[in-house]
Image (cartoon, rainbow, N blue to C red):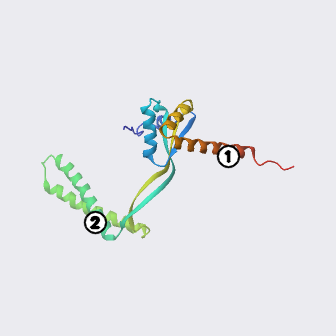
Amino acid sequence: MSTQPTRGLGAAAASKILSLEYPMSLGVHDTYASAQKAVDYLSDHEFPVENVLIVGTDLKQLERVTGRLTRSRILLGGLLSGAWLGLLIGLIFALFDTSGFSWTSVLATVVFGSVFGAIWALVGYSLTGGQRDFTSVTQVVATKYEVLTEHKHATRGRELIAEMDPMAAAQAEAQRAQEAARRSSESHGPASAN
């Protein structure tokens, strides 16, 4: 499996890579692994997968609370991050010092960095006013994954997907027919009663 990030491409180039001309659905999957399996099946059967796009839909944000945030945790975090920054700066200055490498100057920048980091962290925490006294990690995830392809390849793609899983293909076709009927009835509006 190989994925190439679009970072560094520009907005126009990334948009061109991540879009299809007249995309049509080959199926909707509950997991990314299932969508990936469908695309892999297409690839194994020499389908032009360069015309396929997997789109995560129905996004939701998950936030897992990892712990309580206290002044002591803030202080410790500030001390450690300040010490690392001080060590980095101290080593850089010591390496390029014309009078020679000095562990004293490195140690001094570590101490100064620790003090500065602790103060900076406590001031930042105080400014929040206790609004967020916990730590957490967040992630945005999709609940559905739709496999799309160029319109000119949709028929062949659906045939291959039907070979892969006939029951799922029949359900997807029935769902597409229901959606088409719903769109048709919405566009015609309610029948007028005369």
Say whether residue 190 is left or right of residue 99. Answer: right
Q: How many labels does the image show?
A: 2
Say whether residue 61 is left or right of residue 112. Answer: right
Q: Where residue 115 is drawn, which disc sits there?
A: none
Residue carrying label 2: 76
Asked if the residue at tag 1 contacts the one at tag 2, i.e. Cβ–Cβ closer than 8 Å, the answer is no
From the top left corner, tell me how far across and down residue 27 is, in percent. 53, 42
Label 2 and label 1: CA atoms lie apart by: 59 Å
At 70% from the left and 43% from the top, the residue drawn is 184
Assign the N terminus to one quadrant of the image: top left
- Label 2 vs label 1, nearer the camera: 1
From the top left corner, tell me how far across and down residue 32 is, in percent. 44, 46
Q: Residue 10 lies in what quarter of the image?
A: top left
Q: In this view, does 3 lie above or below 62?
A: above
At 24% from the left and 59% from the top, the residue drawn is 83
* Nearest to N terminus: mark 2 or mark 1: 2
Q: Nearer the viewer, residue 126 or 20?
A: 20
Q: Residue furthest right?
A: 194
Q: What element carries label 2?
A: helix
Q: Is mark 1 on a helix, strand or loop?
A: helix
Q: Residue 172 lies in what quarter of the image?
A: top right
Say whether residue 20 is left or right of residue 130. Answer: right
Q: Which of 153 and 72 is in front in this view?
A: 153
At 79% from the left and 47% from the top, the residue drawn is 191
Residue carrying label 1: 182
Amino acid at the residue labelled 2? Leu
Q: Nearer the viewer, residue 64 or 44?
A: 44
Q: Which of 138 and 96 is in front in this view?
A: 138
Classify mark 1: residues with Cα within 10 Å, few (<14), some (14-19) or many (20+): few
From the top left corner, tell me how far across and down residue 140 is, in percent. 45, 53
